[in-house]
Image: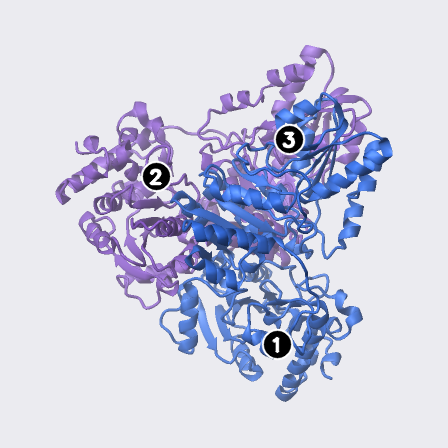
Chain colours: A blue, B purple
Amino acid sequence: MYLEKINGPVDVKKLNVAELKTLAGEMREGLFNRLTVHGGHFGPNFGMVEATIALHYVFNSPKDKFVFDVSHQTYPHKMLTGRAYGYLYPERFNEVSGYSDPEESEHDHFIIGHTSTSISLATGLAKGRDVNGRNENIVAIIGDGSLSGGEALEGLDTAGEMNTNLIIVVNDNEQSIAEVHGGLYKNLDELRATNGKASTNLFKAMGLDYMYVEEGNDIEKLIEAFSKVKDIDHPIVVHIHTQKGMGYAPAVADRESWHWCMPFNRETGEPTITFEGEDYSELTGDLILDKMEKDKSVVFVTAAVPANVGFPKANREKAGSQYIDVGIAEEQGIAMCSGIAKNGGKAIFGTNATFIQRVYDQISHDVCINKSPVTIILNYTSVFGLNDVTHLGIYTISMLSNIPEFVYMCPTNKEEYLAMLDWSIEQKEHPVLISMPGNGVIPASYPVDKNYDEINKYQVCENGSEIAILALGDFFQLGQETAKEIEAKSGKKVTLINPRYASGLDEKLLEELKANHKTIITLEDGILDGGFGQRVASFYGSSDIKVFNYGLKKEFYDRYDVTELLKANKLTKEQIAEDVLK
Amino acid sequence: MYLEKINGPVDVKKLNVAELKTLAGEMREGLFNRLTVHGGHFGPNFGMVEATIALHYVFNSPKDKFVFDVSHQTYPHKMLTGRAYGYLYPERFNEVSGYSDPEESEHDHFIIGHTSTSISLATGLAKGRDVNGRNENIVAIIGDGSLSGGEALEGLDTAGEMNTNLIIVVNDNEQSIAEVHGGLYKNLDELRATNGKASTNLFKAMGLDYMYVEEGNDIEKLIEAFSKVKDIDHPIVVHIHTQKGMGYAPAVADRESWHWCMPFNRETGEPTITFEGEDYSELTGDLILDKMEKDKSVVFVTAAVPANVGFPKANREKAGSQYIDVGIAEEQGIAMCSGIAKNGGKAIFGTNATFIQRVYDQISHDVCINKSPVTIILNYTSVFGLNDVTHLGIYTISMLSNIPEFVYMCPTNKEEYLAMLDWSIEQKEHPVLISMPGNGVIPASYPVDKNYDEINKYQVCENGSEIAILALGDFFQLGQETAKEIEAKSGKKVTLINPRYASGLDEKLLEELKANHKTIITLEDGILDGGFGQRVASFYGSSDIKVFNYGLKKEFYDRYDVTELLKANKLTKEQIAEDVLK
């Protein structure tokens, strides 16, 4: 096996084209090895095997610098840069992450997990090189799905006036996560159809030089193309046409499902782990589709991640023109929703929490200043959600709950989530965010309101004295357990409150609590800094009430064990009870 | 005078072309009226007089809906929609704002002040129209300078696949605020040079239909063009070539200086109000230029607002290739800085606080997760800064101080600002934000450190007991005064602390304060929610220390009187002293 002996790009350069082809086969076996057991990004990596071999054959990494967009297609790159063990030996799978990481290898220059950043980062590397008088090649590798993101388009525009070496490899596999969307993809179609000769050319319009390579999975052709642009003295786009999921028939046939995979059986293509029961994504899709059927003004917008927020393919088909995927373009998505809401539509935007970071300004400026009644649904806001450092949702309360006019709702159970969603879509007064609970679909244990017009009205679930727990969102169940723990240890009945709104205080209730409470506990599923609990602490700051805030310490966490992380942050009922009763 | 009799677009339609030309002259007089006395956006409005007349002549606002990008060019639109009084009668100038506002008129559909949003908002209006089965025209009007913004490019891309009426008027005046930057402007040049015939065409590459109008200040030609696209059944870009500042020679000659003006003398073009003495922008430019001369790796990046952060034209020329204006493209600017910092450059990014809202994700993902030692300098973070609702900087601490790894510095005086800036540029460990004080250039009244490596180390300026004031950033002087007020009223010596870092706590010091203090006062120039003070309140939440947080209530404020706003938020020394001593 060649792959076992590849310790770095130098070893790739020693092989001839026939050997490189064999290597490509071995690398796909490596991908199967890991992905059948571990899951991960499938399609992007299977499609990029040949291009990655050619890049390492032609360029001299780490002197020449590759920036992989999203970096979810870096598995082949990792295999060729001393990390093949992460694909060959199951016991070492956990030693490599799913994204690029400079701490793993000198061949990785950034931790990257969001889309559309590679060109911009590469322009910076190029400028840093130039001011230091060096001459390495800077190469950004970006998938076509990522091109629609504002940062990528801004990056192309800036690259278009740089007079220096910069190579932008556009890996065109005719697919985003779901379908590609946006007018620019018509141009990519045209360019592919004309072997790159079409007179209309987005990249040229941005001021860039351009080259087309139809055979994006042909090592020889790719080596030829990359050799031509190596050491070029100006920016150029090398548009390569690849096959997403190449080498596995089910992945070629269904590119969306195989963008990312759970552990699976190679023979059947079926996942080996399955989740039973309800999930919030499905519940969301059902509720919205039901509304859409009765009301043509209901519109659901997503930015390329429909399946995570209720719209797998079947639902998209049912929704028809009431469903819009703007592609990877969150800014567009949010502003469009504001426009829909201002012109008589009921606009819902859904995405993963980590991607909402892209639109602080659009939420504030385009939506909240204008009081547009847009509903934003977020998946994975929770510590129980995605746990790669680039994909954490635990900063969301801190980031968004402090924007004026924004109503940030944290449901605690299934019925409450659905009631809040229903209310939000129908009301006309407020921009609203609803956070999908991250701790499973749990039924209500207290009555659930239908109407949430009285903003910042908390729900008192249990009336006690001395100690009150404000347990926000999906930490409500932890609040319930903690109340029981404290009651068991102290014999005192604890007041349990469901705050429901992360964005404001029920000042009347908090004032009333002063009468017969001495201690307030806040729990929230997110970092403490800038969050819900600190606002409560401030409210009581000059009173005699003691406030204990529980949540996560402000840090970047990577691939954590959730049980350990919670314990380290004193987020167990035992720790809290002990703390408070001290 | 025609203008006095124009109560709405209906009255515009009654005039013939000769009369409309006279009207244009009257409108420019109206602009002079207001701008010589009141100041405001000059060039954008003088250039858009004819186009605005033609739009109102052809379309039927408010049924047909105009969305003006940034909306700083809406003065002519306001004149034609019943608000001419705001330009004719000095006593009524304050009744119209400098931006569009639905509360002012049914002809305005959004409050807008940031760039690059109009196309996206318009796609939403179009969708809202379609799902409700109506058929009005939706028209976005966007300046060429705004096109480089990610949201605008995403908007073009989405528009490019909509099969419905949407008209995008690109007002090309060959100018952003400063020079235009980015490869796409080469394409606009080409399109102008070929009367729109160039085969390379950005808009077509985005999937859009296209029309070019060279005579962008000719009412007749514009009426002809707009009539052709009225009621069109698909999206089209109407690219019009206008003259920024048309009708005033100094503004045509120096488009950058006349983008926005102070009150001025029409004969001489000289401002009638001048500011004496130092300002932070100038101090910033001086320090960075000095560094650049000694160190070729120092690079300053801005997104189209160089003059506000130290780089007026003369400084840009001195900086040469160490200065980069990426155009209106903050995402690109921040990511590029991360790349520069990771490849041996010393990267500084400067902009106005309100525009940093665009880059929460880039600061978190591209910079902070990667610990890129980028320095970000912000102007107008303060309540004393810009006071239009779309341009407030008072949310910045809340938005950015809670991002892990980010060091958010709030200098309290001139020497400290310069020392922090110097330190930040030279250090290699931290992404840093430095907030320019908003309350004038005030000399240091306590010793200033040179080294800030010890992150979150606060400075104790006065040692007292019982009461301690943590006075952050440009509220330090308020802290000094408040200390004196409390001392005068209580006879007790107050501890005065300069926290310096908004992003973290000096836990050791806060712990020590417990020994001989009972009350902690925090002061910060920003909203309280998610800010510095609430973090302090949380720290002391379970102790006996009383904490009083002072700052602004979480709200959108518009064109406020700063003295009144501070009083309404209890931000005077007398109010604080009274509160605390109660």
Left or right position of B282 against B579: left
Q: Which of A59 and A439 is in front in this view?
A: A439
Tell me if residue B496 can be seen.
yes
Using the image, tell me which numbered label, if any, was put on residue A49. Answer: 1
Using the image, tell me which numbered label, if any, was put on residue B115. Answer: none
The residue carrying mark 3 is B472
Amino acid marked by disc 2: Asp
The residue carrying mark 2 is B108
Q: Label 1: how many residues lie within 10 Å, few (<14), some (14-19) or many (20+)?
A: many
Check whether the beta carbons of the residues at disc 3 and disc 2 lie within 8 A of each other. Answer: no
Amino acid marked by disc 3: Leu
Q: In what quadrant of the picture does the N terminus of chain A appear?
A: bottom right
Q: How far apart are marks 3 and 2 (CA)?
A: 39 Å
Check whether the beta carbons of the residues at disc 3 and disc 1 lie within 8 A of each other. Answer: no
Residue found at x 29% / y 55%: B238
Tell me residue B423's x, y (percent).
Answer: 66, 43
Q: In what quadrant of the picture does the C terminus of chain A appear?
A: top right
Tell me residue B209's x, y (percent).
Answer: 31, 62
Check whether the beta carbons of the residues at disc 2 and disc 1 lie within 8 A of each other. Answer: no
Report in which chain the residue with disc 1 lies.
Answer: A
Q: Residue furthest bottom?
A: A18
Tell me residue A213's x, y (percent).
Answer: 49, 78
Q: Label 2: how many residues lie within 10 Å, few (<14), some (14-19) or many (20+)?
A: many
Tell me residue A428's x, y (percent).
Answer: 45, 39
| Helix, strand or loop under label 1 | helix
Closer to the camera: disc 3 or disc 2? 2
